Amino acid sequence: MLFKNVLGLEHIKNHLVTTADTGRVAHAQLFVGPEGSGVLPMALAYAQYLLCRNSGGENEGGDMVCNTKCGSLMHPDLHFAFPVSNSDKVKSHAVSDHYLQEWRQFVKDQPYGNLFDWYRYIGIEKKQGQIGVDEAQDMVKKLSLKAYEGGYKVLIVWMAEKMNISAANKLLKLIEEPPNKTVLLLLAEEEEQIINTIRSRCQILNFPPLAEQAIADALIERGFEQTEAYTAAQEANGNFNKALDLMNKDSEDLVFERWFVQWVRSAFKAKGNKGAIQELVLWSDEVAKTGREVQKQFLNYCLAMMRQALLLNYKAPELVHARIHLEGFDLNKFAPFVHENNILDIVEELEKAIFHVERNGNSKLIFTDLSIKLTRLLHAKAA
């Protein structure tokens, strides 16, 4: 994975290259960025730069054999940890090493992919993966060994916020007493979900969403038509993974918008309408049959759409990037129903639903309750 394959983010690349070239490499670093911002590609490129003793700001001209090993994610001093779960392949005590072959292919195919893409790739999309204590024990064991090639050892922990508390405490000991020339790169989308004792001991690097131009240029380079590329780049809102999905008509957002439109239409009709209440119950049943990761993603999509509707209502269309592709639903006409008298309550109910889904609550009850509350909130009068 070369730095030149990372979209934009020149200031971050320059910072990381400088720390490597001057020998000021922090042993524990936390890369924080939204989905599709390039956190994983940058971490892989940085790891390669460190392991292969490259210089001059590029991953070339150093140890070519080492660069080849890193490019295929098979360097013996490059280790990974990522969320997994038991599956048809792994019946119990699943750890990252059980899925290394799939991981290498996934990173090659979807370096900007999200957590659900990964779960779907290994067939656990209806489960909630995690980085557990078995994984943490593996991390400690790997990093306690001497480096095979005499330089750095690098551990990349992807989606580090998915560590459970037992794993986090074990990793904390590793951060507090790191083996010599060991670099831990923790990658996360939600920094606040990582325990404070780990965060306070890491050097934190924040990644912004990608620039529209960088996304559009990358799409055009991949052979997509220019006008469509710019439209997708705008709609993606800094998320290259979403831009690719939109271009390939493979975005989960296309499913989510169908659910969202069906949901709000039924909610509008449901006031005093028994038939529409039944529609909401059936809708809740449909969503409840999906995996919990899908449910959480959908609820976050709803949060984003409600905020976009509020921006439209308050005459800030330049800040609105979302589009509804379904015919017959106009976000501009929906926007007046999201206002100062109900937006805080709508957000609170959606966040509560996410909380209960994460804690394995009964999904059908969660979504039915949320739907009934949405019916009341959407009929609230603006000031």
Image (cartoon, rainbow, N blue to C red):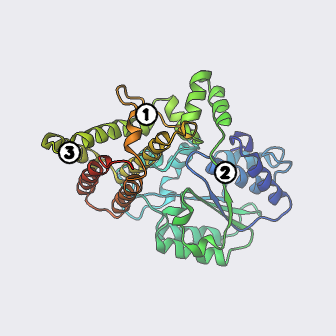
Q: Nearer the viewer, residue 210 or 25?
A: 210
Residue 243, percent across and down? Answer: 55, 35
Distance in Å between CA atoms under marks 3 and 2:
53 Å
Residue 246 seen in the current view: yes
Q: Within 10 angstroms of label 2, few (less than 14), some, or many (20 or more) residues?
A: many
Horizontally, residue 273 falls left or right of residue 117, namely: left
* Mark 1: amino acid: Asn
**CB contact under 8 Å: marks 3 and 2:** no
The numbered disc on residue 271 is: 3
Distance in Å between CA atoms under marks 2 and 1:
42 Å
* Mark 3: amino acid: Lys
Q: Secondary structure at mark 1?
A: helix
Q: Within 10 angstroms of label 1, few (less than 14), some, or many (20 or more) residues?
A: some
Residue 104, percent across and down? Answer: 56, 47
The numbered disc on residue 368 is: none
Q: Which residue is mark 2?
A: 44
Q: Which residue is mark 1?
A: 332
Q: Nearer the viewer, residue 150 or 229?
A: 229
Q: Secondary structure at mark 2?
A: helix
Specify the quadrant of the image occupied by residue 224.
top right
Residue 122 seen in the current view: no
**CB contact under 8 Å: marks 2 and 1:** no
Q: Residue at x 59, y 43 (%)?
A: 111
* Mark 2: amino acid: Leu
**CB contact under 8 Å: marks 1 and 3:** no
Distance in Å between CA atoms under marks 1 and 3:
22 Å
Q: Residue at x 29, y 62 (%)?
A: 361
Q: Quadrant of the N terminus?
A: top right
